[in-house]
Amino acid sequence: MPREVKNGDRGVDMKTLRKPDKVETKTSKSVASALPAEAGRSNVPASSSVNRKEVRTPVPNESQARPSSQRGIASSKTDGPSAPRQPTIQEWNELVQNYHKERDHRTHLEEVVVAFQTERDHHLHQYASLETELHVSQRKIESQNEEIGALQASSFSAMDSARWMPMDVGQTRAELEDLHASIWKLSRTYAADTWLASERESDDPSLRLDLRSALNHVVRFGSKGVEALDELTNVKRASQLCLAALISDHVAMTILESPFFFVADRKAFHDVWKRALKYDPKKAALWRSDTLRLVNPLDLESESAKIETAAIKQSIDVTCKNFATQYAKKIPEPLLRRLESSIHEEFVQELVIVYQKAGTLSMRLWVQRPSLRCDYLADLADIKFDIRSKILQAHSLHRIDDSEDHTHDGKLIKVVVQPAFRAAGTHEAEGYDQYQDKPMHIRHHLITPGRVSSGKSTFIEQVTQLQGIKIGHQYESCTTDVEPFEFELDGRHVTLIDTPGFNDSSRSEAEVLTEIANYLDFTYRNPPHLKLNGIVYMQSIQDPRMYGSSLRNLKMFKDLCGESPMKSVLLTTNRWDKARSCGEFDKAVAKETELRDKANFWQPLISRGARMVRWDSDDTRAGAVEIVRALMSAAPEVLQIQRELVEQEKRLVDTTAGNTVNEEVLRVEKEYQAELVKIRSEMQEAVAARDEEVKEALEQSKKDYERKLGKIREEQDLLHYERRNETRRMQNEMDDLRSAYDRKLEKQLSAQKLDFDEVVAKLTANQGKLRHEQRVAMQAEIDKMKKEKSGKRSAGQLIMKILPLVGTVVLEGTVKAILGQAEDNLVQDYLC
């Protein structure tokens, strides 16, 4: 029996739900059929937390489903049990929708949790990676700090030992003097006590000839020849002096003078270096310094550096030992004592020690100083002794300690014991030609400025005795260019430089100034960096007065020279012979006095050191030669315009002389402009008056002044001329020379049919000798060539492109191996 439902009972009979009547069954089926297949099957995921019992949708009884009013009516009609009520379709759909929403929400939450866990794992992995990188970076920083500390310690150690820092002048001089002291000590110990005793006893003429030949390098015999040996007999300790002189001379020539004395192929290296010095001394000094650094590693802590340094030291010692033992056999017998064989061996051993000491010093000097100059007796010509000289100093044997003692001044030096060594600059080739002591200028340069027809060319012809020198007459100049004339005087090389005058009727002041400035600029800017020993300023004593052009020429002369060189100026008056022949000698003397005493003439120059001299052209050559001799002993000077153009890098118009010319040009231009304005005004009046004759005359005057203005503007252009034409000409010459070498070298390389890969392999093997930037440049050219097709790759072209970038250091082995010595010399010529 079904359970009776009491009034107000809202319970649900599960049996009733399981056994609905037919109508309700249909309804249930219709609802079930309306559900999706998933809902009908109750396919809840296994991971879902929904209980299976909760999936079953409870079916409310009829009382619950029916409205309250109906429930009340029904219950009032009967008190019996009511039938169970099925949910409506709407209610059933709402329940299903709620279920799906809850399920979707739970699914979304699960996905969010999974995504969060995934992201968390990713961040944890990133954190672990960053932490690992941090530890690695910290270890790298610690390692780099250790390396930096070691490098700093090495650098400070190197600085303390002054290994790469330039030796100061005092230290250089002290070490050279110490070397000389060792040579002098050796000479005192082993030199013969009695000068030439063995020679007189043996009376062997060959000994005298050998001795004379050997001493030629250190003793000046003059014209007396072998007989002059006897004059040295009375010189105290002459044998010691000569032996020391010979050893010093040989040490200088074989060891100190050549940076590559210890290299097996020393002559080839020395020749390349000397040839490069002629073209670019600074680059040659840098090349030499870099090459020597390669064999003198700075980092002496590494084993490889220690091994390399030891090998170089052994090479130096062996080379110096060979030099010493070979020269010991060549020392003239009369200079040495009669030594037993054992004592002679001691002499050779001590000589080896001296040479090895010189070798070590030479290496240090050439690494730490870019220039080391040795002046030998042959280089010094007939230099007379001067107690104040820094180049030639008397030996302590002569006991000349007082700098005011001039007893020996003017006497020819008989023996030069120690060659004059001079070092200059830093290892970076700065100041490579700035020696501490002034070099002895064997070449003497004299310039001869003056007015047109003042006798400059005649003077040069008389002194030089050269044929073909053009000499002008009246007021027409034959000197249109700056022209040097070279000749020998008293065994010395002299150059007289003729210049055009500023009062030339055929040329403007700007043109003359530009010509002189270009010459002085170029010769001072480039080797041998010309300085003038003296200036001969010519003035005809027959000029009636110092008129405008003469005063103008004098002012230009002062602006060119400046104040400092005035002590090297000879104000020379000429044509005294004509003054005598014309009976105007007294007038000429009065003119000379006027020139000397007047402030607007030569008096300011004389007050600054210039001297006045007379030159009679009827004295032929003698008088002119004496004038030149008077200036040959003067110290070389730099002219004001050379200093302004080269050292101060001024434009010509900004120099003192250029400004003087420019002021005159501007003054004349202003006058011409005023005249043109006046002419135009008069032309307008002539046009108004219809005066054709006056108009034509004014038109011609206008053209003349416009032409003059054009000339003035050309002069201004000359003054602003910044050596463009000269620079272009020199650049063209260099380009032509380089092109010729390019063609010749490329022809040689092409003839060899070189293998590209073989050349690259050799270059790569040698690249350790290069600096970093050179290696990068070379590798870039190799990579660029490798991109070409195999048929277009050219080993010759590769070498041609690399040559200007890396020089010969990396190529010396490659080129010699591939091309041979002859072509390698061509490469050296190309680089020089």
Image (cartoon, rainbow, N blue to C red):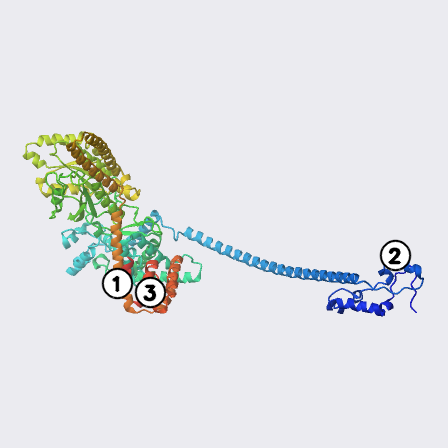
Q: Residue placed at 83% from the left, 68% from the top?
A: 23
- In the rendered view, would you say 280 is above or below 671? below
The span from disc 1 to disc 3 (Cα, nearest Å) is 20 Å
Q: Nearer the viewer, residue 238 or 81?
A: 81
| Label 3: element kind | helix
Q: Nearer the viewer, mark 2 or mark 1?
A: 2
Q: How many marks?
A: 3
Q: Nearer the viewer, residue 623 or 323?
A: 623
* Mark 3: amino acid: Gly
Q: Mark 2 vs mark 3: which is more N-terminal?
A: 2
- Looking at the picture, does residue 223 appear above or below residue 799? above
Q: Which residue is nearer to you in this view: 656 or 794?
A: 794
When the figure is inspected, residue 290 is found, relative to residue 631, above or below; the finding is: below
Per the image, the residue denoted by label 2 is 69
* Residue at x-position 36% and y-position 50%: 166
Q: Quadrant of residue 831?
A: bottom left
> How many residues crowd around disc 1 within 10 Å: few (fewer than 14), some, or many (20 or more)?
some
* SS category of the residue bearing label 1: helix
Which numbered dot is residue 813? 3
Please rate how many residues cluster around mark 3, counting C-alpha atoms within 10 Å: few if below 14, some from 14 to 19, many from 20: some
Are circles 2 and 3 on residues that touch, CB within 8 Å?
A: no
Q: Residue at x 5, y 35 (%)?
A: 581
Q: Which residue is mark 1?
A: 744
Q: Residue at x 20, y 33 (%)?
A: 606
